[in-house]
Image: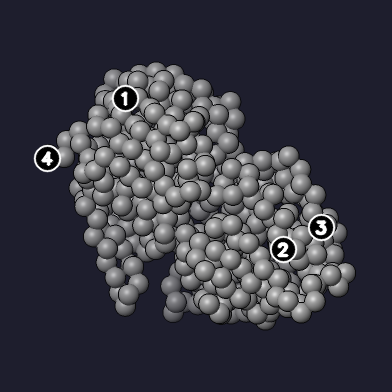
Amino acid sequence: MNVRITPHKFTGSVRIPASKSHTIRQLLIASLADGESVIKNPLDSLDTRSCIEACKTFGAKINEVYDNKKLVSLGIIGNNNFKNSPRASAVNSSQIDVGNSGTTLYLTLAAAALQTQSIEFTGDESIQKRSAAPLLDALSCFGIQVQSNGGCAPITIKGGWKSGRASLSCPTSQYLSALLIAAPLAPSGVITEIDIPLLNEKPYIDMTLSYLKNHGIPYEAAPDYSRFSIPGGSSWKTLNCPVPADFSSAAFPAVAAVISGGKVSLLGLDPNDTQGDKYFLTMLEKMGCQVQWQDAPANEGSERIVTVWREGALCGGTFDLNETPDLLPAAAVTAAFAQGDTALVNVSHARIKETDRIAVMAQELAKLGVCCTELPDGLIIHGKGGLFPDGASPDSQIPVINGHSDHRIVMAFAAAALGSPKSLEITTAESAAVTYPDFLPLLTADN
């Protein structure tokens, strides 16, 4: 599906959707617990749907509750680490299709290793190009049988879990989160030891560990997270909690406002949450934007509101995105509207997301007259204050941006279109529904 975005000022209040990272973690934890959990205000997106179907395959019973066609909660009866009869040591199907959800793939690969029936994992074309090899190699160190297509899907997993020690390099933190969620459920007496020579996206590990701490699950960790030791024999407790709003998604309406000269209030975000992508607000401040936190009016509850706008020109800067690679597309289009160079560095793992986001952003920004320099681990955007800064817009035709079936690429260029001297057309726009189904309608995109 293609969308055409017409330039206009973006302003107003936006309630930010729930965090994908929290939603998927809570879904999997509740599915592995013994008893009934309630997840309030989950993210309703394609990635969530993929995780729901995977958890059902593991034997969880999931009831979706709607209010005026809006998903407001998930009721989940867990399978207690596959122990509940008659589903013991078995799943309802031998195959799990994770769609486009890398988070679902990695986290459920480790969960599948807790039982003894072979499970095959597959997904869409993008997933079949995303390697899980480091995670699979680690699982094999714990006695788990693994087959794959060179580390990519289709992948077959067969447990069970034994004591062992593995070296796990983590270009994506999801490899380690997968083991941290599953390893405590290994049989009592089993010790899972993990050495971590490389760890990107550290805040996501903080997020996962917050769940272990809240559930009283024991583990030992080196202060720099270079080593973990996790005893088996624990259980996940049931959940009854809301899902925090998503700072990753919040970046896009924030960018839409500052690019277009508008002002937006973002609702539902918790400045104390573990999500690393709240760094984007710091980036905007350093680029010359105003970021203001305040309490909601007393009659609207106790949540916080953050308002973002700019009063002058954006300026460039250097930003280390190692902990927050998902910010690269939004940061890159913001940098295109800045004066001077913006360097997004230490983020080589952005090349192994749904697309090679470094190469794709350079390629698509070039269509809009914005020069970029690719680095092995980043991108320098040579900003001149906007798109087509030298009058290079191609005659009267509407530029067509390839969204590459990547939700963050699509949303970044949709935001950029608001400050463009002319409308932009973006392909594969349906992929925005992976994490933020309402974003394109929010920008009044015309299908």
Q: Earlier in the sequence, mark 4 or mark 1?
A: 4
- Provide the residue designation for mark 1: 161
The picture places residue 169, in percent across and down from the top left corner, at 55, 29
Between 43 and 352, the one nearer to me in the picture: 352
Quadrant assignment, res 48: bottom left
The residue beneath circle 4 is 86
Specify which label sits upstream in the sequence, 2 or 4.
Answer: 4
Marks 1 and 3, the one that precedes in the sequence: 1
Q: Which residue is mark 3?
A: 371
Q: Residues within 10 Å of mark 4 (few under 14, many from 20)?
A: few
Q: Relative to residue 365, is residue 404 drawn left or right?
A: left
Sequence order check, earlier mark of 2 and 1: 1
Is residue 430 shown left or right of residue 40?
right
Q: Residue 12 versus residue 118: which sits nearer the camera?
A: 118
* Label 3 neighbour load within 10 Å: few <14, some 14-19, many 20+: some
Q: Residue at x 69, y 49 (%)?
A: 359
For residue 96, side relative to residue 433 (left or right):
left
How far apart are the alpha carbons under marks 2 and 1?
46 Å
